[in-house]
Amino acid sequence: MPEESIGFLNVKAAGMYIDATLGGGGHSLKILNKGGRVLGIDVDQEALDEAKKTFEIQNSNFKIGKEIVLAKGNFRNIATIAEEYGFKNVAGIIFDLGVSSHQIDDPNRGFSFSKEGPLDMRMDSNLSVTAKDLVNGLHRNELIEIFSRFGEERFAHGIATEIVKVRKDNTIKTTKQLIEIIESVMPAKLNRTAAAARIFQSLRIIVNDELHSLEEALPAACSLLQSKGRLVVISFHSLEDRIVKHLFSDFERKSLGVVITHQPVLATEVEISANVRSRSAKLRAFEKK
């Protein structure tokens, strides 16, 4: 939702902005083209490297380190990163919480359930725990809890039970192996792809501690905004959206500002037809007092 997100961000020339989830750099590029200065943060070094190439190819009117500053780090540490690079009292901050196309399209990262690869799912390769570790190391009840709570999967019990059964004889190492287990449990008449998406989502959330990171990041981001500064968040599943909705409402109750999206903004049919991954996107925006 690039146009909607940049519209709600209300970019002003010479304003300072933080792209807390740089990814491929699409949002940052649009901010730069409107005259803003950007701090782009990403926990994935590959994303930073790819974005740097994009900026250099797309526009020669701004320089890395001047108009666009790139920083490796988890957005849960946004306050510390912003202070380090001089991005305090900023005009706007954007979070796009989706997995980037680069991460999904690279089978070696293990995010995609449509391509065979190692069960990794780490956004930061320096993290010590992978999805493989969870699948092979957690007790059955722990797996059930993860699949139920973070994937909202109603067949969590059956899938966890089958995982424990299979791993007694063979370590589950690849996305294909996990998909085969999910498909063996799911009734044929149900959408097995959707179930796989939910299971992969739940493992990814735990590996990267995504929800706790978001809960820590949004209050810190709000504190970095100047008066009339905007905070825009695009989420992709209900667990994230609930956190954003709750925290924005809490900010408003504390008289920190106002929620400017009374209902989440959804992707248009045109965008969904061009990018099917946007179908679950929900955008919410907050303006500081």
Image: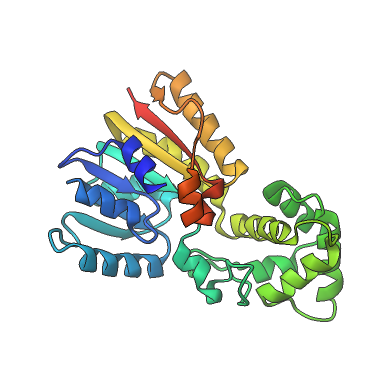
Compared across the picture, whether 137 is left or right of 249 comes to right
Image x and y of residue 101, in percent: 46, 63
Q: Residue 36 or 18: which is nearer the viewer?
A: 36
Q: State the residue in front, 216 or 22.
A: 22
**Along the horizontal axis of the image, is 155 left or right of 19?**
right
Q: Residue 44: percent from the left, percent from the top?
A: 42, 64
Q: Is residue 196 above or below residue 75?
A: below
Q: Residue at the spot x=65%, y=61% of the render?
A: 200
As drawn, 219 above or below 149: above
- The image quarter containing residue 60 is bottom left
The residue sitting at 33% across, 51% down in the picture is 27
Q: Is residue 217 visible?
A: no
Q: How is the image coloured?
A: rainbow
Q: Is residue 262 left or right of residue 89?
A: right
Instruction: Name the outermost residue toward the left.
Output: 61
Q: Position of residue 71 (x, y in %)?
A: 31, 59
Residue 93 in sight: yes
Q: Residue at x 81, y 61 (%)?
A: 159
Label total for image: 0
**Furthest residue to the bottom?**
170
Where is residue 128 drawn, in percent x and y?
56, 68
- State left or right for residue 209 relative to residue 256: right
Q: Residue at x 51, y 36 (%)?
A: 244
Quadrant showing the C terminus? top left
The image quadrant that residue 120 belongs to is: bottom right
